[in-house]
Image (spheres, grey):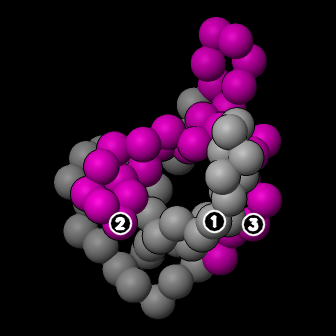
Amino acid sequence: MKVELDYRAMNGRWGPRIVEPYSFRLTKAGNFILYVVNDRDQIRGYRADLVVGVRPTSETFVPRFAVEF
């Protein structure tokens, strides 16, 4: 199922994003990163500490990559 993220970027830009979630990883720097494919069909990583809201959508997707949760 796709999810809607409310995300506040480091540059201050804020807004909702509809994404396909694939992976949640810890970086060497100690940040948790959620890797997704966004609604523009781009692979993106979002820092978990900058996600300010998450809501499930009713939209499903067929995974293009292995889902690692």
Q: CA distance from mark 2 to mark 3?
A: 17 Å
Quadrant of residue 49 within the rendered picture:
top right
Look at 42% across and 42% down and name the residue there: 44
Q: Which residue is mark 1?
A: 15
Q: Give the crowd class for mark 1: few <14, some 14-19, many >=20 residues within 10 Å.
A: few
Asked if residue 48 can be seen in this view, the reply is no
What numbered label is drawn on residue 24?
Answer: none
Which comes before the other along the chain, label 2 or label 3? 2
Q: CA distance from mark 3 to mark 1?
A: 10 Å
Q: Which residue is mark 2?
A: 39
The magenta stretch spans residue 35: yes
Confirm or deny contact between disc 2 and disc 3 (CB under 8 A): no
Identity, as a three-letter code, of the amino acid under mark 3: Gly
The magenta stretch spans residue 49: yes
> At which x and y percent is residue 23?
47, 42
Q: Which residue is mark 3?
A: 53
> At which x and y percent is residue 57?
52, 83
Identity, as a three-letter code, of the amino acid under mark 2: Asp
